[in-house]
Amino acid sequence: MGWLQQDKGATVLIADDDESQLMLLEQTLLINQFAVIAVRNGLEAVEAFIKHRPDIVLLDVDMPQMDGFTACDLMRSQFPELTVPIVMVTGMDDVESIEKAYAVGADDFIVKPISWPILGHRVFYYLKGSRALSEIKERNEREKTLFSAIPDIVIQFDETFNAKDIHTGRQQHLFTDNCPDTGNLEGCALVLMVKALLKVQFGGQSGSLGRQQFEESLWLNGKLNHIEIRIAASQNNEVIVVLRDISERKANEQRILNLVMYDQLTGLPNRRYLEDELDRCLTASNPNGDKVALLFANIDRFSKIYESFGLKVGDQLMVKVGQRMKEGLRHIFQGEHGASPGHYRLSRFSENEFAIMLTHLSDSNEAFRIAQLMQDMVADSFDIEHHEIYISLSVGIAFFPDDSSDSVKLIEMAGQAANLAKQSGDHISCYSASFNEQAQRKLQIERNLRKALEKDEFHLVFQPKLCVDDPSILSAEVLLRWTNEELGFVSPGEFIPIAEQDEVILDISRWIVEKACQLNARLYHDLGLDVTLAINLSPQQFTHQQNLVNFFAEQVSNVDMTPANFELEITENVLIDDVDYTSKQLNQLREMGFYLAIDDFGTGYSSLSYLTRFNIDTLKIDQSFINTFDDPRSQKLIETLIVMGKKLNMKIVAEGVETTEQLAFLKRNHCDYVQGYIYARPLVFDDFVAFLQR
């Protein structure tokens, strides 16, 4: 580890506008005995680079005044002769950012969150690689000097490859005896090996050699040595051969290769390894018509694990997931089938995504079976620092040559299939041609959603909510509808999830609240109808909308209504995101007089304990339970939900009621309200008024 000692004290220039990130970088590098220069933007980084000439530079990508890409470009353009390693530190894990980093002269990149324990080692390896490049340059310069001045072995052969003279340089360890000192060159093992090698490589004619350079591995002193052989000159049919032991350089190159091609956290091959291996595999001949399958296994809700347990636990989880997959696949391909390990390649493709390349497949169903077995591998809990953690996988599959013969496209297809598996809840999905249609459809919806408000394409409908014991109590849920001139009618189930992925949902949500208040005011002030309207809230309103509570108060006040005329419906997912902050906002709304309801209860991720932590007025039983009403277990579950809600002083609403049998059952079990087609479908405003006045 002498090379580690050699690099201790090296100067590291770090640039990051995030104070906490900058502090962690600085402390980690100081612990590893580096000298550190810390700056907070790209402009300062360039100035420090010019002034101090550091040994290595770590640049954050996003910084004020000058970003990391620009700073890197300036350093390289102003000092092209310097081989100082420049490493980009970025939270962006996409091909475009990586390509841009390399284009401006960066040597590598580190993706946030940084693995602090190995950061020092990575810097050591970068410095070692930088020195290796410098040594290559110096070696080229030394080759221009006299043979006697170089440290390499120089052997002079005559036209029949008999050794005439030898210069041992500083590599005496390659000689097994003292033959150079005695002059017995023909009895020297190294000379005999080189002589035989030259004859095999070039035949018996020395005059046709010219200048050549190649590498060979030779056994000397019971050790395999990597030797670089250069034919430096040929004159009068004499040959001068220069030998250099490059074993240490080869070892360093392997270390650097491991940094480039292997994930430093899990030890598994990384994204670059997979891309290279996949490209090599797809370009090879396939005479038997065997398939290649690419599987992307995405850990569901992985960001929540980081948020709940911290980076350390999240990193340990990734290591253990990788170990399980590695052992599981080894058992499948070696133990169960007796197949060669070359039939699969496992890699960590991104932060929460593993990739498996399966080769020599004769049946596509085999890939689907492997995907199911991968899900089984992670089904048992992971015990990490006294935390019992459960995870699930969404797996996407794409096939060569069925889906594509291009490695880049195959990776995209497998990623798209994994996203569909996650969004649809199917957990395993194969790529199909319909993906392109779906992608185009999504792009059309995204594009038109941004203009829907200004084009006045939205309108509200009313789903009546009937009180079982007192039909005179008037209430309804307002629902959003969208008709676009290009797409026609678009189902809420299609466009709402897309809107939720973008802040456009905030503008839409504000419009819904404003419109619902205005229409309720018309019902009350113009028609004398005292109606309680339920409004669905987006989870993003709690995390991104400023002054949410004041907004609702202003909207109600603007139309001269009271909060008691409105019920705000939230989904279970809202309750698990920043519980304390959400609880505070909900309590403020309830204190103002708004009613609160949990929508789609039983379909989300929250536990029953949330019902005791929040002051909720209404519990809405999801229609999926009503749809399976014929199953006795569903009936028992509905009965339990009603009893539980009433014990907590909540009103109970059943959604999706369509038959008289369902209605009779709900009445017998004292359900308070019902919604569904048994009474009415969602109604436009005028039809809703007629329904109330019937």
Image (cartoon, rainbow, N blue to C red):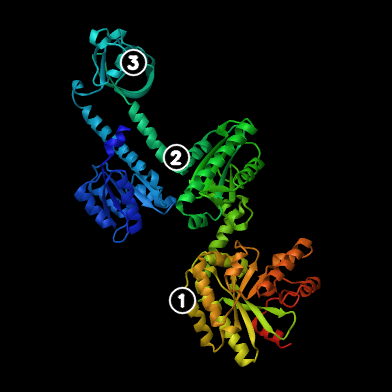
What quarter of the picture does the C terminus occupy?
Answer: bottom right
Q: Is residue 568 visible?
A: yes
Where residue 18 appears, x then y in whole percent?
34, 58
Q: Which residue does the image show at 29% across and 61% down from the upper left?
A: 65
Q: Amino acid at mark 3?
A: Val
146 or 508: nearer the viewer:
508
Q: Mark 3 touching mark 2, by CB under 8 A?
A: no
Reading the image, the residue beneath label 2 is 262
**Which circle's residue, 3 or 1, is located before the other in the chain?**
3
Instruction: Tell me where residue 520 sits by quadrant.
Output: bottom right
Q: Amino acid at mark 2?
A: Tyr
Q: Which residue does the image show at 74% across and 65% down from the upper left?
A: 627
Reading the image, the residue beneath label 3 is 194
**Disc 1 secondary structure class:** loop
Local crowd size for mark 2, using a 10 Å CA cut-off: few (<14), some (14–19), many (≥20) = many
What quarter of the picture does the N terminus occupy?
Answer: top left
Please indicate whether residue 471 sits to the left or right of residue 47 in the image.
Answer: right
Please indicate whether residue 552 sits to the left or right of residue 434 in the image.
Answer: left
Instruction: Tell me where residue 657 sits by quadrant.
Output: bottom right
Reading the image, the residue beneath label 1 is 547
**Disc 2 secondary structure class:** loop
